[in-house]
Amino acid sequence: MKKSVFSPEVQTEIMSRLEKPTETTLPLWGEMNTAQMLKHVQLAFKISTGQIKVSDRSTFFTRNFLRHFLLSAKVPSLRRIERNPPMTFPEIDVQLNTTVKAGNFTTEKENFISAFRLLANIESFAETHPLIGKMSREDWGNHFYSHINYHFTQFGI
């Protein structure tokens, strides 16, 4: 069964894992620091609610094949990530987009907690994801967990 951020058990898991990183925790891959990672995930939440608009970049492949992987919470191997780095939407790229720079770790952690709690209680979301197409609330819950898990794993948490 897929994990969803709408499950109280999963919410507890995420909050528990969030206690582990510090300002100086280094990523196992990629170049973000912990504050940037937390900011990036918060920005991704805003895509689902329509607060951040991202143009449709879906293709037959992403809607029919990549979709299953992105909703599964599986993290690709480090070798695969290094060979084919995941795409980040420019609108939520905290390293390249100067309008979405992250603050300090403590602030971003507090903001993540607030955004996560708010997200867990929202009933309606965008009907589509800009990369994988049509989404139900259940799909969004799986996707949020998958995305958070990916980045927490990136930092060894």
Image (cartoon, grey):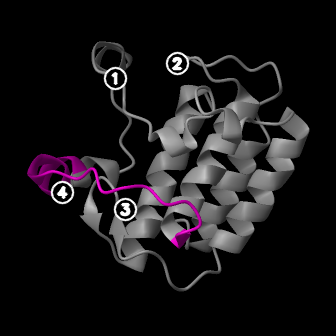
Sequence-earlier tag: 2 or 1: 2
Disc 4 target residue = 63
Disc 3 target residue = 2
60 falls in the magenta region: yes
- Label 3: how many residues lie within 10 Å, few (<14), some (14-19) or many (20+)? few
Sequence-earlier tag: 4 or 2: 2
Secondary structure of the residue carrying numbered label 2: loop
Secondary structure of the residue carrying numbered label 3: loop
Type of amino acid at the residue the image marks with label 4 = Arg
Residue at mark 4 to residue at mark 3: CA–CA distance? 18 Å
Residue at mark 1 to residue at mark 3: CA–CA distance? 19 Å
Q: Nearer the viewer, residue 96 or 76?
A: 96
Q: What segment is highlighted magenta in the picture? A: 49-66
- Label 2: how many residues lie within 10 Å, few (<14), some (14-19) or many (20+)? few
Sequence-earlier tag: 3 or 2: 3
The label on residue 77 is: 1
- Label 1: how many residues lie within 10 Å, few (<14), some (14-19) or many (20+)? few
* For the residues bearing labels 2 and 1, Cβ distance under 8 angstroms: no
Residue at mark 3 to residue at mark 2: CA–CA distance? 26 Å
Sequence-earlier tag: 4 or 3: 3
Type of amino acid at the residue the image marks with label 1 = Ser
Mark 2 or 1: the one toward you: 2
* For the residues bearing labels 4 and 3, Cβ distance under 8 angstroms: no
Residue at the location (69% across, 40% down)?
A: 99
Residue at mark 2 to residue at mark 1: CA–CA distance? 13 Å
Percent coordinates x, y for residue 21 in the rendering: 76, 31
Mark 4 or 3: the one toward you: 4
Percent coordinates x, y for residue 25 in the rendering: 74, 21
Q: Quadrant of residue 98?
A: top right
Disc 2 target residue = 30
